Image (spheres, helix red, strand yellow):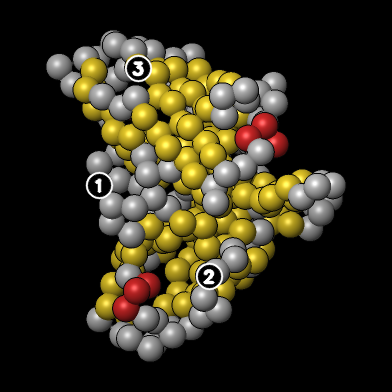
Amino acid sequence: DIVMTQSPDSLAVSLGERATINCKSSQSVLYSSNNKNYLAWYQQKPGQPPKLFIYWASTRESGVPERFSGSGSGTDFTLTISSLQAEDVAVYYCQQYYSTPHTFGQGTKLEIK
Amino acid sequence: EVQLLESGGDLVQPGGSLRLSCAASGLTFSRYALSWVRQAPGKGLEWVSGISGSGGRTYYADSVKGRFTISRDNSKNTLYLQMNSLRAEDTAVYYCAKIGGYCDSTACYNWGWAYDYWGQGTLVTVSS
């Protein structure tokens, strides 16, 4: 199984500042035949299901604010929020869908400093 | 708009069985792969099982293989998860989730098993 490890486990950032969450996979999730990274990011708020924010490691889902961006390739990935807003407080998960089981990271809790 | 509605969660004793359902609307159901993802109380997300649009291919996490069975009835737009030999560690909210993507009149486009629609979840509690 591919193990997904996120860092940090929790993060406190001031409003308007940049937030960065890292995700590392135990093996590459880059599929060479199409040059796509099978990596997604989700946001989950309390009492709600997860919401897809990023897929193919860097493609924003429709409706996701432009301040969210995904980057990285192979085994190392980053979710960046360029200017933190109050509504961004949530837990963020990365997920690989390169191979089954489609494992998730342990989550990163993002708070306002 | 796509909607997924889970049901069937309950309190069950260890060793017992339960069948979860996920009723879908707003999509051509048979064109999309679906999965079950669970979340234990206060914990992270765990992928449980997935099934292709036709139902011909199924996938399971090792933690549930041999105990859980995923299936779908495309005539009823419904996904199922039959759970047998339940254990305390199966206690969780179970979500059904749709593979990301869309279909138009000519073709389907998906972005792999990244899930763009989720249900609200149904709670399964395994306890004596």
Residue topped by disc 1: B42
Residue mark closest to the camera, 1 vs 3: 3
Residue mark closest to the camera, 1 vs 2: 2
Kindly state the secondary structure of the residue where label 1 is placed. loop
Kindly state the secondary structure of the residue where label 3 is placed. strand
Q: Which mark is residue B18?
A: 3
Q: At 59% from the left edge and 66% from the top edge, which residue is drawn? A: A62
Q: At 39% from the left edge and 87% from the top edge, which residue is drawn? A: A17
Residue A113 falls in image quadrant: bottom left
Kindly state the secondary structure of the residue where label 2 is placed. loop
Q: Which mark is residue A64?
A: 2
- Decide which of A61, A112 is in the foreground and name it: A61
Q: How many marks?
A: 3
Tell me: residue B28, above or below residue A20: above
The amino acid beneath tag 3 is Leu
Q: At 29% from the left edge and 33% from the top edge, which residue is drawn? A: B123
Residue B23 percent across, percent down from the top left: 48, 32
- Decide which of B22, A89 is in the foreground and name it: B22
How far, Cα to Cα, is label 1 from label 3?
A: 22 Å
- Disc 1 crowd rating (10 Å Cα; few below 14, some 14-19, many 20+) is few
How far, Cα to Cα, is label 3 from label 2?
A: 36 Å
Instruction: Tell me whether circle 1 and circle 2 mark residues in contact (CB < 8 Å).
Output: no
Residue B48 percent across, percent down from the top left: 47, 32
- Disc 2 crowd rating (10 Å Cα; few below 14, some 14-19, many 20+) is few
Instruction: Tell me whether circle 1 and circle 3 mark residues in contact (CB < 8 Å).
Output: no
Residue A112 percent across, percent down from the top left: 27, 78
Earlier residue among tags 1 and 3: 3
State left or right for residue B16 relative to residue A76: left
State left or right for residue A14 relative to residue B52: left
Residue B76 falls in image quadrant: top right
